[in-house]
Image (cartoon, coloured by chain):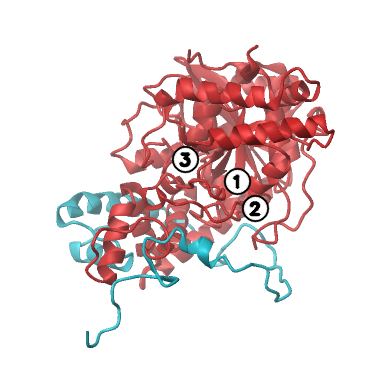
Chain colours: A cyan, B red
Amino acid sequence: MALSDQELKEIAYLARINVKEDSLPSLKKELEDILGLFEELNAAETSEISAMSHPLDLSQPTRQDEVTEENLREELLKNAPSVQSGLFLVPKVIEGEE
Amino acid sequence: MDLHKLYLSEQLEGIKSGKFSSTELTTHYLERISKFDEDLNSFITVTEDQAIAKAKKSDERYKNNTNLPLDGLPIAHKDIFCTKDVLTTCGSKMLSNFEAPYSSTVFEKLDNEGMVMLGKTNMDEFAMGSSNETSYFGPVKNPWNTEYVPGGSSGGSASCVSAELAPVATATDTGGSIRQPASLCGLTGIKPTYGRVSRYGMIAFASSLDQGGVVARSAADAALILEAMCGHDPKDSTSLNLERPDLTTNLNNPIKGMKIGLPKEFFEKEMPSYVEKSIEDAISIYKDLGAEIVEVSLPNINLSLPIYYIIAPAECSANLSRYDGVRYGYRCEDPKDIEDLYMRTREEGFGNEVKRRILIGTYALSAGYYDAYYLKAQKCRQLVANDFKEVFKNIDVLLSPTTPGTSFKAGEKTNDPIAMYLQDIFTIPANLAGLPGLSIPCGENAGLPLGLQLVGNSLEEDKLLQFAHSYQLNTDWHSKMPDIS
């Protein structure tokens, strides 16, 4: 299973992980080795098998639509890297006039 | 008195009868931690002040006859379990400054029984690793020989219990992260049926595989603590809606007449002769105890490793997308825009193994590859689960080695991800099928311990623990501890 540099960069962008140019070759080799493992699955006959998404064969429990959590705003903001006026602060996202 | 030599039930009895207090017991362990852990690095955080305060409260309850079931017993928690107002790092730079705003259900349950937290144990970053070398907080050492790894990802939990710096520790297992370090450190480690232990507040790696459990020095100790961790939790939608199981009452039941299956596909693998010998010895002990031994076949079990390395990274890539440098955790310096903030935060905040798995998972889930990889893996997972279903119609437990051998030297497999992944070749299948599994010490080679794995049918933790306990009543592998002084 060969990966091109371009493919690797696209995956890294989808995952929003910056990958330095000089680490591309070793990373590519590692990922190709792991992808190589997957080829063993090709031989398995699965046309009659349905996908198993979960080990438990149970239905999802439901609950009353009631508020159970108290307001933890201050508590939760304590861990934020940057906060202003009770809001998470990030670099400007919306284009427009300064 | 060597308080750390006592098993949990003896420690509990000692406190109850007034031989020693929880404060004395807790202080004893805290002193051992400060004396020995600098070298082992099994703790990320030691919660000394909180521990002493808790122990004092516990002693008061004994005085007032209001004591709780496990009151005053110390425990270490894997740093994957959120503990309110205490650092919870998951072994990552990404969460190196994260103080959880709430506690995990596992912590709450044990806290409500009166257990005293000694601290948070080191682990492979986000539980991804089999040697505890991927932790941002440095590698953990194996107390049996500090040049060797303790296994992973619950390496800190295993190392500290093995060195008797804590009598017991919580742990988690996604592909073997309880059983493999238990094997490499000479401990009893159990992963219950998926859904037995709540995952609320247990930092997610691969949600359909992750399950909490415990590492201890005996099956009886493990049973006592696991029982207290189990039970339905409305805060976890995958928590089984069942009463907390009784794992202790029938521990002494004989296993005579029960059937042990030996998976042919596992025993066909090439193994070092000391592994074969230890397993043969264990089998003959079980025969002497009256168990019947039968060979069984799980024809698809050798697909487990590739299935796991598609499903686990796929779920990890989704779960770890939450670490974006916005709401909590690490954020890169001077981001020039929001994209740069995401890209560099994740580049700098995650270690290599975590990034590798996120990338593999992203690839397996991406357009054009989803059917070939993820869907195919989920279908193959069903094949493996069906194999287990079939064999458990005729047997009580499956027996195999836990690991392909004893521990390996630090650095030996760090540059070869696949060699590292092969550590979990015997443990992964139980996670895929959601079945309970445990590892108990059954031998040694060159001064390093080796584990025996037992896998049970769904919800049959009690039976697994009976098998482990009856083995331990007739052997002394579990009572051997490393000399760390």
The disc placed on residue B198 is: 2
Label 2 marks a residue whose chain is: B
Q: Can residue B36 be seen in this view?
A: yes
Q: Name the residue under label 3.
A: B153
3D distance between C-alphas at marks 1 and 3? 12 Å
In depth, the one of B186 and B53 nearer the eye is: B53
Image-based side of B416 in relation to A55, left or right: left
Q: Looking at the picture, does residue B74 appear above or below residue B446?
A: below
Q: Looking at the picture, does residue A71 appear above or below residue B242?
A: below
Q: How crowded is mark 1: few (under 14 residues within 10 Å), some or many (20 or more)?
A: many
Q: Which residue lies furthest to the front in this view?
A: A85
Amino acid under label 3? Ser
In depth, the one of B92 and B115 nearer the eye is: B115
How far across and how far down the image is residue B240, in percent? 71, 56
Q: Earlier in the sequence, mark 2 or mark 3?
A: 3
User: Is disc 1 in contact with disc 2, using a CB cutoff of under 8 Å?
Assistant: yes
How far across and how far down the image is residue B318, in percent? 44, 63
Amino acid under label 2? Ser
Image-based side of B290 in relation to A11, left or right: right
Q: Mark 1 points at which residue?
A: B212
The disc placed on residue B339 is: none
Q: Looking at the picture, does residue B331 appear above or below residue B397?
A: below
How far across and how far down the image is residue B21, in percent? 71, 23
